[in-house]
Image: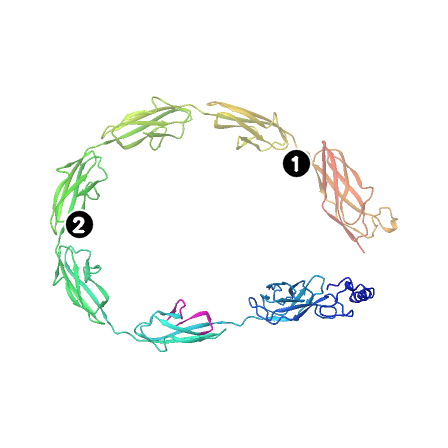
Amino acid sequence: MRTRTTSPALRGLLATVLFATGCHESVSPRRGRQGPEFWEVPAQALAFTVQPNNSTPCPSTIAPPVEVTAVDNQGQAVPDFTGDVTIAIGHDASAAGNATLSGTKTVAAVNGVARFGDLCIDQVGSGYMLQATSPDLTDATSTAFDITAAPPTTGDLIVTTTTTGSNLPTGYTVAVDDRPTQAIGANDHVTFSTLAAGDHSVTLVGVPSNCTVNEANPQKVSVPAGGTGHADFTISCVAPPPTTGDLVVTTTTTGSNLPAGYTVMVDNGQPQGIGTTGNVTYPGLAAADHMVALSVASNCTVSGANPRTVTVPAGGTGHADFTIDCAPTTGELVVTTATTGSNLPAGYTVMVDNGQPKTIGTTGNVTYPGLAAADHMVALSVASNCTVSGANPRTVTVPAGGTGHADFTIDCAPTTGELVVTTATTGSNLPAGYTVMVDNGQPKTIGTTGNVTYPGLAAADHMVALSVASNCTVSGANPRTVTVPAGGTGHADFTIDCAPTTGELVVTTATTGANLPAGYTVTVDDRLQAIGINDRMTFPALAAGVHSVALSVASNCTVSGGSGRMVSVPAGGTAQVDFVIACAAPPPTLVFTQQPNDAVSNVSLAGSCTLPSTRGLPTTVSGQLTLQDNLGQTVNFTGHVTIQLGQNTGGGTLCGGPTLTFNLQNGVAEFNLSIAQGALETGTYTLVARATVQSSSLSVESVVFTISLVT
């Protein structure tokens, strides 16, 4: 809401003052009115003097035109107002709230009135309001109005076809007025959308002659605005009388040299294939006379007229039955071969009339059936070492229905020989064998003294190569050229000498001391072998070179100079490693030869060894300790042994101190000691004894024993 800076009352007071002081010109009287009591009051606000009416969306305009008037503070029109008035949507009643007001939205007032004659709103809605504005004047808002959808002006038309009877067509064409046609099935429906409301002409087109439309065609159909009109066509169809028939052509053939088949033509039309004994059907021919022609091979004859006329009845079948006899026109040719000699090939090839070659054995035959009865040229291709007796190629006559013969005799001379390779080897470190190659072909294995034969080599010079080990030498040329005679044998004799490539290793052991083990383990490279404590062992056929030798001994034994050595084994010679071992006796062990006994106490001393005797005495435990060697024999030793409590679940106390000392006499110590039982009814204990003998610290723990209270 806009407000002016000077109130109407103040402006009236100002006018009165100016009039009283003679300033008559400062406030103008209203047009057409005289006298000092009527003064012009300026426009204060806008008012809708013609409200917007309900309408439809653009392009429909709001009618009658909306009018907005400038008024004073008394609501009276101010005809002198000529300012611009702008109108807009004050309340948007569209669903999305984004309606648009179109038309001339700013108009200059005439006689104080702004008239809007072309306003429209683009979206439907109920409760729209317009707002009018002008600078320095109070805005005005219209009454509510609606924009409703325009009533429809078009409708749809559904065309339906229902066809009954026989020989029904696949469909028709439907035309509405001058619109493009649409296809429709025999029992179908199509829709023509957005037709103008009113009468329309509907025509069913393409109805075949055996069908009848039962309704008027075309039909006049009324399409209501916003609704649907219907044009229903029912069509009845009947089967037309037959005007065609079928023609069946059959063939029956006898004789020989029958062709694969014949061709038949009707009325000089498209030829069709037919078997020598078979049939073919021509359906749907016009009911009339037809010319039927059968084309046969030159050696075949058709009985009766050919071509011949055959009548095809309407709705029936005409027949053209042909009987054919064929005379023979071909014979067969048999080619045979008989071969002697040596180095016979796998076979030969034979050609008749320069045709496709066929394979034939050195002694065999091949048959060419169905050759034309005539002279034929027969050629036999043989290996270069073979000769054909008689003409080659030669002419052979094949009689009609008979057999012609081409008999070839061939002799073959030898073209190959064999090669024998032998080896004779001396020396040492002989390999398992060698490989031999002839003419850089596939290698073959041959023994160090042996032989291998290459049969069927071409009679010519051949290169023979023998591959030997690096320590072996071949006498004479290698490779060498050997001549293989035709039908004979060539020889390649190789003499080989092999030098040694390995040596042997001798390992000895010499052991002194006590508690000697049964033996040791010697390792040469990765090879383990058992060896005695005073022994000699040979490792033969070691590769010439440096080898590692290690001796594994018992923990109480020491190898002089260390247990691992590196030794060089000479080719063809012997290397030796000597191990000297000294073994010492193991330290003795301390053994409870008499274990402490379970005991019973009649009073709890609560772990104290010093209570008055009237309360009872500590429990006495006794036993024996013996110093033994590894064979279980007593060791004659005099010294001391200490005893402590080990396990102590009864909370007892060892009387005399935590550690007690006893004498070892000739390796034996007898002990008696007292344990004060704790407050528990039962306790389990062990004793731990320790002694130092020959610089060795020995210890042993007794079995578990129990002290129980008697209550």
Circle 1 sits on which residue? 630
Q: Is residue 248 visible from the viewing direction of this image? A: yes
- Choose between 394 and 172: the one closer to the eye: 172
Which residue is rendered at x = 55% and y = 28% of the image?
549
Give the structural element (helix, strand or loop) at label 1.
Answer: loop
- Choose between 173 and 391: the one closer to the eye: 173
What is the quadrant of residue 323 in the picture? bottom left
Could you tell me residue 353's position as x and y percent? 17, 43
Give the structural element (helix, strand or loop) at label 2.
Answer: strand
Q: Is residue 346 above or below residue 41?
A: above
Residue 387 covered by magenta stretch:
no
Q: Which mark is residue 369?
A: 2
- Choose between 288 and 373: the one closer to the eye: 288
Per the model, the C-alpha gap separating discs 2 and 1 is 106 Å
Could you tell me residue 117's position as x and y percent? 60, 67
Residue at the extreme top: 476
Q: Quadrant of the N terminus?
A: bottom right
Q: Earlier in the sequence, mark 2 or mark 1?
A: 2
Q: Is residue 186 visible from the viewing direction of this image? A: no
- Three-letter code for the amino acid on which mark 1 is drawn: Asn
Where are the magenta residues, as a range? Answer: 177-198
Q: Which mark is residue 592?
A: none
Asked whether, in this view, residue 498 is left or right of residue 686, the answer is left
Q: Quadrant of the C terminus?
A: bottom right
Could you tell me residue 158's position as x and y percent? 43, 72
Which residue is rendered at x = 16% and y = 56% of the image?
258
- Three-letter code for the amino acid on which mark 2 is drawn: Pro
What is the quadrant of residue 486 in the picture? top left
Asked whether, in this view, residue 12 is left or right of residue 316, the answer is right
